[in-house]
Amino acid sequence: MLVLNQVHKTFNIGTINEKPALRGVSLTLNDGDFVTVIGGNGAGKSTMLNAVAGVWPIDQGSISIDGIDVTGLPEYKRAKYLGRVFQDPMTGTAATMEIQENLALAARRGQKRGLKWGITKAEREKYHEILKELDLGLEERMSSKVGLLSGGQRQALTLLMAALQKPKVLLLDEHTAALDPKTAAKVLELSDKIIAENHLTAMMVTHNMRDAIAHGNRLIMMNEGQVALDISGDEKKSLTVEDLLMKFEQASGETFDDDKALLSK
């Protein structure tokens, strides 16, 4: 479903601030894979997600989604293949619009605009049902402005909107980092549910080592712009934080050094 082949990206080329961010990353996600991505600061995690999303062009290599080469496509042309949830809960929704209006925008993404963009009764019924599944009471507040919701409620809504059209690939970029632990756990539970029920292919960047182990069917650890570890199947199911740190040291020859991730052990 997603193939990165020898992807390179360097920022500020030719300057004293030149920074290689991705160094020949090759990675294949099969249909239905849910991959968690962890690594230290500057390891290339978010850079890799931005490369997939087309935020900026890569220097070398290729990227394909469901067999379609998107390497040369700008971000807005790749959007139809992707769903994305960012770290900031305020980013993915329109605060001055109603909950149902936000869902309608997500449902109409990529469609031509015309004179019949009003929300139909059938759509309201559909939105009521899918919001009810979140178990946050939002189905009774569909006409409320999104700006009145809590950060966790907005992030749950953003997640629902990102998955509404069943994207080829769902990108979750530290989407629980700004939430309190209880709310983060709820959003992660919703993530698991939405990904499984819709059979989505997903990639989740996180700094939380326990979350990286507990969620998804595959774990990738990055280091200095490369994939240092790729663990799946029974090996991932039996993995502990201590195992992960030891495997990282064996694979990279370095001690894992990221205060935020280590504190989340």
Image: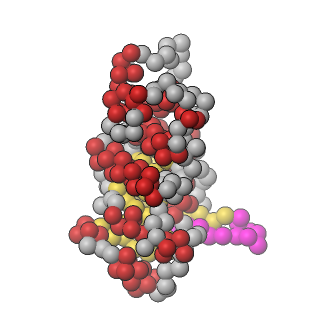
The figure's colour scheme reads secondary structure
User: Where's the C terminus, which quadrant?
Assistant: bottom left
Q: Is residue 160 visible?
A: yes
Instruction: Give the residue at the far left of this rendering.
Output: 234
What residue lies at 34% left-to-right and 60% top-to-bottom? 215
Is 148 placed left or right of 170 in the picture? right
* Residue 32 spot, x, y in % from top left: 30, 51
What residue lies at 49% left-to-right and 16% top-to-bottom? 118
Q: How many numbered tags mark residues here?
A: 0
* Residue 152 spot, x, y in % from top left: 48, 46
**Nearer to me, 153 or 80:** 153
What residue lies at 53% left-to-right and 45% top-to-bottom? 151
Q: Is residue 7 visible?
A: no
Is 22 included in the stretch rendered in magenta?
Answer: yes
> What are the residue bounds of the magenta stretch?
12-24
Is 146 placed left or right of 82 in the picture? right
**Nearer to me, 117 or 65:** 117
**Nearer to me, 62 or 221:** 221
Is 76 included in the stretch rendered in magenta?
Answer: no
What residue lies at 30% left-to-right and 42% top-to-bottom? 198
Q: Quadrant of residue 249?
A: bottom left
Instruction: Give the residue at the far top of this rendering.
Output: 115
Q: Is residue 108 depicted above or below 61 in this figure?
A: above
**Nearer to me, 85 or 189:** 189
Q: Is residue 252 depicted above or below 107 in this figure?
A: below
Q: Is residue 78 depicted above or below 96 in this figure?
A: below
Q: Is residue 37 depicted above or below 121 in this figure?
A: below
* Residue 196 spot, x, y in % from top left: 29, 48
* Residue 109 spot, x, y in % from top left: 49, 31
